[in-house]
Image (spheres, coloured by chain):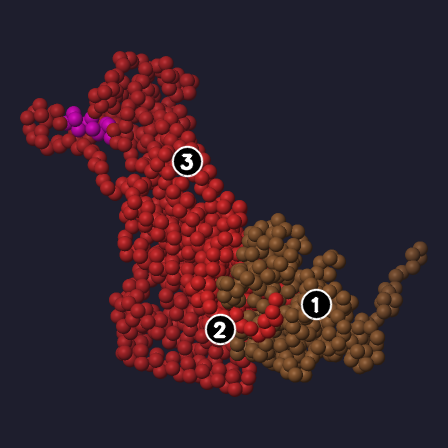
Chain colours: A red, B brown
Amino acid sequence: MNSGHYRRPEAATSAFRRLTRLALKECRESLRDRRTLATLLLMPLIVYPLLGMVVQRFAFSSVSAAVPEAVVVIHDRLVLDDARVMLAAIDETVTVPEQNSTGNDELLASGGVNPALPQIDLPLLKPGAGQVRPLLRVNLEATYALELIERGLREGVVDVGVALRPRPADAPQDVTNTIEVLFRTGDPISEAAAEEVAFRLREHRDAAIRSFLNRMQIGGDAMVKVRQQGLQSARKSESPLAAFVPLMLVLMTMTGAVYPAIDLTAGERERGTLELLMAAPVSRRQLLTGKFCAVFLVAVMTAVINLTAMMVTLAATGFDRVLLPQGIGVQMLLQVLLLLIVFASFFSSVLLSITSFARSFREAQAWLIPLMLVSLAPGILSLMPGVRLTAWLSLLPLVNIVLLGRELFQGIAPTGLFLLTLVATAGYSAAALRLAAGIFGSDAVLFAADRREQQRAPAQLLDFVPQRIMLGTLLALLPLFALLAGLRGRLIAPENTSGQLLLSAAVLLGVFVLLPMVALRLGRVNMATGFQLSRFRPAAVPAALLLGCTAWTAVYELLLLAGSGDTVQKIMDNPVLRQMVDRLTSNTSLPLQLLCLAVAPAICEELFFRGFLWNGLQSMLPGKFRPLLISTAVFAAAHVVTDASLTVERLPGTFMLGLLLGLLRLQTSSVVPGMLLHFCNNAVLLSLERLAPAMRAAGIALDVRNQQHLPGRLLVIAAVVAATGTLLVVFAAAKDRREGRV
Amino acid sequence: MSASPEPPAVAVIRPASAGQAAVDVRDLVKEFATATGTLLAVNGVSMQVYPGEVYGLLGANGAGKTTTLRMMLGLQRPTSGTVRIAGFDAAADPIEVKRSVSLVSSSSGLYQWLTPREIMLYLADLYGVPDDQAAARAEMLADLFDLRGFMDRRCAGMSTGQQQRVNLARSLMHDPPVVLMDEPTRGLDIVGSRRIFEYTAHLRQQGKAVIFCTHRLDEAQRLCCRFGLMFRGQLKLEGTLAELQRQTGREHLTDVFLDLMPPENSLAERQPVLPESGQP
C-alpha cells in the first residue's frame, strides 16, 4: 500500500449516480431482511384470503339465514277472513287457508305463534334499501282481545296488532271505522312490519274504492294505481363497507413501510453506523433521500401486492359486486395505484421524520404506536357513509386519501379533487422529508444523551424544553382537548351559557397550562423559561395593543384578497359557530365573555403555543422559522376543533393570527406581548357588534356578511395603527440586539 | 498484518522539514447552554499532530475528549477556534475535511445484512472514491486484514473478531491521512486489543496522523509518541513521555494523570459514622 497522504480521491461520481447508489444500498439492506419480506409478502397473501373467507362465512350466511319474522295478530272485533283478505289481497301468490276460531288464552301461553296452527307468511312488497326487513307472519289461527294484543306487544310476543276502532254511534256521517296498526315503538322489526301492514291495508282500501267507482261508472281513472318500480342505475347506493377497502389498503401500506423506516434510521443508531454516516462527506439530505427511496420502494411494493391480493380475493369471493359498484376496471386500478404511490411517499417521509428522533428500535416503535392510532381516526371518519370529499377535506392528510380511495372505487371521484389530493399529499411528503433531513443525525439527536448528562450534573433546572417532554405532552394533549371540548356539552347543559363559557375557560387552563406545567415539573425544567415568560421591552406593550386592535382587519382583508371571501362567509354560516355565537351574545354579559373568550385564551394559548410548544420545537429543530411555522400550524389546527365538530373554514384566519403572534414572540423573546395582542384581537372581535353603532356614528359602516371590503377610512386608520405598532416592535428588537440581550 | 506488535520507540517522529501538521487545532472552544450559564465542554484546546505520529489524547470520562474529536470530524461545530485537517479548514471546507479523516470507535458497527465487500464499496461511494480504485482497494484491504474467507458473506453471521477486522478495513477505504480513534479497545478482549495495537502501528508505518483517545494509560504509553492530557475541557499537559516526566517529576503516566485530578478525600475519611450496634 502506498502512503496516499493528502491524495484526494477524485469526485468522479455525479450527484445523481451517488444518490442511486445510496438508495441501492438502503434497498438492499431492507429487502434482505426477512422481517421486511414477511410484512411485504406473507401478510397480504395470508390476511386477505383469510379475511375474505371469514367475512363470507359470517356476513353472507347471517344475512340470508336470519331474516327476522314479525308476528301479526288480529283484533277480535275484525272478522278474521276480512283481515286475511285485506292483508293478502294485493298478493295473488298467497293462498289463504280456511280456518276460523278464537283462542284468546292460548296466545301468551304458547309464547306467540303455534307453528302447528295455520298462518300465512307474506313476502315483502316494498323491499327496503339496505335495511333488514322482516317477513310478516300473520297469525290466522285466532283473533284476540285488544288488551291481550297490547299486552302481547309490550311483552314482545306480538310485533304488530291489527285492531278495529268502530265509529261511535253518535259520530257524524263522514267519520268511518278506523283500523289501527299497533306496534312497539323503538323496535325496528316491529316498526318495519307495521309500516308494511299499513301499506297493505291502504292498498286494499284503494282497490276497494277503485272497484266501487268502476261499478258506479264514475271516474274510475281518478283512483290511479301507484306502483313502485326499481331501475338499474350506474350510481348504486354505496355499501357501508366500501370505505373499508381503501382504509385497509392504506393501513397495509403503512405497516409495510414501518419496519424499513425504523431499521434505516433508528437502526443505524442502534448498530453504531450512524456516526460513520455523519462523519462521511455526504449531506444529510442526500443520505435521507437514499433512505426515503428505500422505504418508499418497500411501501409501494406493499401497496401493489396488497392491491393485487385484495382484488383477487374480492373477485374470488364475489365481494367485488357488493363493494365495488363499478366492478374492477383497469383505469380505476391505475388511479388507486397512483393514489397509493403518492400516499406511500407521504407516509414514508412522515415515518422517517419520526423515526429519526429515536435512539433505538424500541423507542421508534413506541413513537409510532401513537402515530398509527392517530392515523386510524381519519380513517374511521371516512368510514361514515355521509362524508364526501370536498376541497378542504382533500387538503387534510390521510382523510383525503381514504375518502378519495373510496370514491375511486365507486367511480365517482371528481378529477379536480383527485389532482388536488395528489398535489397536496406530495407537498406534505416533501415537507416531511425536509423535516426528517433536519432531524436525522442532527446534533440534538445524535448527542442528546451527552448533553443531558452534562446538564444534569448540577442539580439544576433545565432552561429548555426537551423534545420528549414537548412531544409527549402534545400527544397527550390533542386527544384530551378534543374530548374535553366534546364533553363540555354533557357536563353543563347547553342552555347554561355562562356555565359553558366558564367551563371552556377551565378546559383551556387545564389543557394548555396545567398539563404542560406538570410535564415541565416532571422533566425538571424551569417554568419561566419553559413557558418563555421572559422580560420584554416596555415598548412592546403599546405595540401589542395597537397590533391587537387592528389584526382582524388585516386578516379579514387578506382572506378577501386571497379569494377566500367565501371562507369568511362559511365561518359566518357555519351552524356550529353561528349557534355558539348566538347563544353567547344573547344571554351572557360582556365582562364574562371577555374573561372566558379573550383573557383565558390569550393567557393559556400563548403560554402553550408560543411558550412551551415553541421552546420544545426549538430544542429539536435548527433555526427560528421552523418553530414559528410548526407552532402556528398546530395553533391553527387546534382551533379547527369547535364543540366536538370540525370547522376547517377557520384554518386560514387562525393561521394568520398565529403567524402574527409568533413573529411578535420572535421579536420580543417573550410570550407576554403576544398575550396582550391575542386578548385585544379577541376582545375587539367580541365587541364588534356592540361597537358597530359607534362606528356608524363615525361614518364607518361594516358589512362583513356580504364579503365587502372594509370601509377605506377604517382601513387607513387600521394601517396607521398597525404600522405604529410594528415600528415599536422593530425598534425594541433592534435595541435588544444592540444591547446583546437576545 | 506486517506490523510488529512491539511497543514503538518513544522517539518523536516530527521532522521539522515535514512542516505542515496533518491535524492543526487552534483555541478550540465548545460551549453548551445550560441553566447555570454556559458549560465549557472544550475550553481553548490547541494541538498539532504530524504525519506518522500517534497522539494519545487522554482524560477521564467527561473531560472533553470525545467532543474535541467530534469537532475534528465535523460532527459538531465549534463555538470558536479553528480546525485544519490535511490543510483544509473545517469551517470553510467541511467536505474535504471529512474526506481526509476516518473514525474508528469501539461503538461503531456494521450493516448486518450487507457483506464486507458491499459495506466497503458503499463507504467508498460515500467518500467519492472512483469505482476502479475502490474495487482494487477493497481487494488490498481484504488481504491486509485477512478478510478473504468472508468478503461475500453477510456480516450477521460473523464472529466478533471478524466484524472488528471488517470495521478496521472499512476505515481505510478512502485512504485518509488522518485517523481518529475513540476508545477503540473498549470492551475488547486481549486478541481484539492486540489487533488494535497492530492496526495503529500499521497506520504509523503508513505515515498517517493518528489521534488515539483513551482513558487507559497503559495502552497509551505503549502506543503513542506524544500525549495530551485533558481535564475539564482544557489541555493541561502535552509532550512525549520524557517531556512529561521532566515537567512533573513523576515517572509513570498514571501519576502524572492523577496529579491533574482535584484532591479528593480518601475513602477512609469519607467513611460514614455508623451507630454502634447493641447500644440502646
Mark 3, mark 2: which one is toward the viewer?
A: 3
Secondary structure at badge 1 equals helix
- Say above or below: A705 vs B152: below
State the residue position of label 3. A52
Please report the residue visible at 25 percent of the width from the left and 25 percent of the height from the top: A166
Residue A86 or residue A292, whichever sits in front: A292
Question: Which of the image's four quarters has the C terminus of chain A?
Answer: bottom right
Question: How many C-alpha atoms fall within 10 Å of the one at disc 1: few (<14), some, or many (≥20)?
Answer: many
Residue A290: % across, % down: 47, 60
Disc 3 from disc 2: Cα separation: 52 Å
Question: Which SS type dominates the magenta stretch?
Answer: helix
Please report the residue visible at 49 percent of the width from the left and 73 percent of the height from the top: A624
Q: How many numbered callouts? A: 3
Q: Which amino acid does label 2 sit on?
A: Lys
- Check chain identity for marks 1 and 2: say if they share one: no
Mark 1, mark 2: which one is toward the viewer?
A: 1
State the residue position of label 2. A624
Please report the residue visible at 31 percent of the width from the left and 41 percent of the height from the top: A328
State the residue position of label 1. B201
The residue stretch that appears in magenta: A197-209
Q: Answer yes or no: is residue B266 visible.
A: yes
On what subunit does the disc labeled 3 rest? A
Label for residue A496? Answer: none
Residue B143 or residue A15, whichever sits in front: B143
Q: In which quarter of the image is residue A53?
A: top left
- Left/right placement of residue A507 relative to residue A711 reads right
- Say above or below: A407 vs B255: above
Q: What residue type is labelled 1?
A: Ala
Q: In which quarter of the image is residue B70?
A: bottom right
Question: How many C-alpha atoms fall within 10 Å of the one at disc 2: few (<14), some, or many (≥20)?
Answer: few
Is B82 a magenta residue?
no
Q: Which amino acid does label 3 sit on?
A: Gly
